[in-house]
Image (tube, helix red, strand yellow):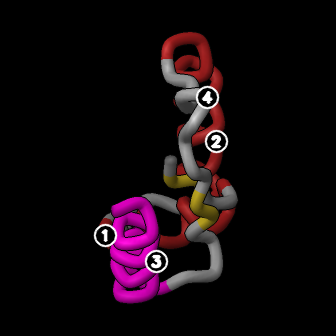
Amino acid sequence: FLVADVAERARRRSLDRPETTAESLATDLRQRDERDAVNTQPAEDAVLLDTTDLTVDQVVLRISELVEARR
């Protein structure tokens, strides 16, 4: 289950949407998180992976390691 800090998620999204401020994106993300929290919960055996300080390549590597560890 991937998670990341709202500020970091907003920063990442602002790279794709330079016309929108990170603050506005952060507000939108917080609101979406609140709506999604009702229906989206990690499974009891889910592994939480905080991607806040990770690059895409690091996330892929970590997921690969988690998959291999469960084989």
Q: Which residue is mark 3?
A: 62
Counting residues from the start of the chain, the first of labels 2 and 4 encountered is 2
> Residue 56 — which label?
none
Kindly report which numbered mark, 1 or 4, lies closer to the viewer in this rendering.
4
Q: Position of residue 56 (x, y in %)?
A: 37, 81
Task: Kindly identify the amino acid type of the residue bearing the numbered disc 3.
Answer: Arg
Tags 1 and 3 in contact by the CB under 8 Å rule?
no
Magenta-drawn stretch contains 61: yes
Quarter of the image where one finds residue 61? bottom left
Magenta-drawn stretch contains 62: yes
Q: Which residue is mark 1?
A: 16
How crowded pointer 2 is (Cα within 10 Å; few <14, some 14-19, many 20+) is rated as: some
Task: Kindly identify the amino acid type of the residue bearing the numbered disc 2.
Answer: Thr
Q: Which residue is mark 2?
A: 27
Q: Which residue is mark 4?
A: 44
Q: Residue at x 54, y 61 (%)?
A: 9
Kindly report which numbered mark, 2 or 4, lies closer to the viewer in this rendering.
4
Residue 15 visible? The answer is no
Counting residues from the start of the chain, the first of labels 1 and 2 encountered is 1
Task: Kindly identify the amino acid type of the residue bearing the numbered disc 4.
Answer: Glu
In the rendered image of this protein, does residue 27 appear above or below residue 16? Answer: above
Q: Position of residue 13 (x, y in %)?
A: 42, 63
Position of the C terminus, as image quadrant, is bottom left
Counting residues from the start of the chain, the first of labels 3 and 2 encountered is 2
Per the rendered image, the range of residues in magenta is: 55-71
